[in-house]
Amino acid sequence: MGINLGDEFPNFKAETSQGDIQFHDWIGDSWTILFSHPADYTPVCTTELGAVIKLVPEFQKRNVKLIALSCDSVEDHLGWSKDIQSYQKCGGDFPYPIIADKERKLAVQLGMLDPVEKDKAGLPLTCRAYFIIGPDRKLKLSALYPATTGRNFDEILRVIDSLQLTATKKVATPANWKQGGECMVVPSVTPEEAAKLFPKHRVQDVPSGKSYLRFTPQP
Ligand code: BEZ
């Protein structure tokens, strides 16, 4: 099982720490990041969900909604949320919902189970997956990390910036690009179109003589 880039994301029903949801309705007009973790009350997961709390304003600025997922119960999510907030030294309401996928239906459907990590009953746990879904409900990006490697959420913000930019402009973002950095004109743009769309672009000479390295200031 699994889902490919460009596929419509499943419109599942789920129980969450903030009530039941129908996923497509919950998305509304936003971009969405659905991210899974192996288990509640575990150390790396606590640092991850805490790091996300700190970045909520950055995700909000980008019109991105966040939703976490593990195979634990709503009761566990609610209890553990207090630990995460205490660790992160922040109060108030927990700022995003956590899906309770106790029967592992979504974990199987979305290809998120990690065969290496098992719970006390020997059942596989979810890996550290994340899915970025556009307002059109299509999958734009996904990644799978093992339980032993916590994610870099600044990188997830960076890829959101790239996805949102390249959704509307005929550019791609090069290695290690950051918001405001130089972009590449995409190969499908003809030289005439490039001159009109990106008057400040430059073509870098290469030994092949081919004009494919076209850099432009970020549009
Ligand atoms: C953790 O979150 O620390 C963790 C969870 C499962 C396996 C290894 C680490």
Image (cartoon, grey):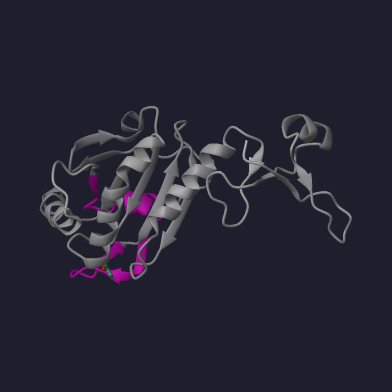
Is 4 left, or right, of 118 in this rendering?
A: right
Q: Is there any visible trace of residue 3 in the rendered image?
A: no
Residue 130 percent coordinates (x, y): 40, 52
Residue 17 percent coordinates (x, y): 17, 43
Which image quadrant: the C terminus? top right
Residue drawn 41% across the image and 54% down it: 154
Q: Which residues are magenta?
A: 98-125
Ligand 1 image position (quadrant): bottom left
Corner quadrant of residue 195 = top right
Residue 21 percent coordinates (x, y): 25, 35
Q: Nearer the viewer, residue 57 or 77?
A: 57
Q: Is there any visible trace of residue 27 in the rendered image?
A: yes
Tell me if residue 116 is in the magenta stretch: yes
Q: Nearer the viewer, residue 84 or 8?
A: 84
Q: Nearer the viewer, residue 172 or 218?
A: 218
Residue drawn 20% across the image and 56% down it: 88
Residue 178 percent coordinates (x, y): 53, 50
Residue drawn 33% across the image and 38% down it: 12
Is 96 left, or right, of 143 in this rendering?
A: left
Tell me if residue 88 is in the magenta stretch: no
Q: Is 22 above or below relative to 112?
A: above
Is 218 left, or right, of 186 in this rendering?
A: left
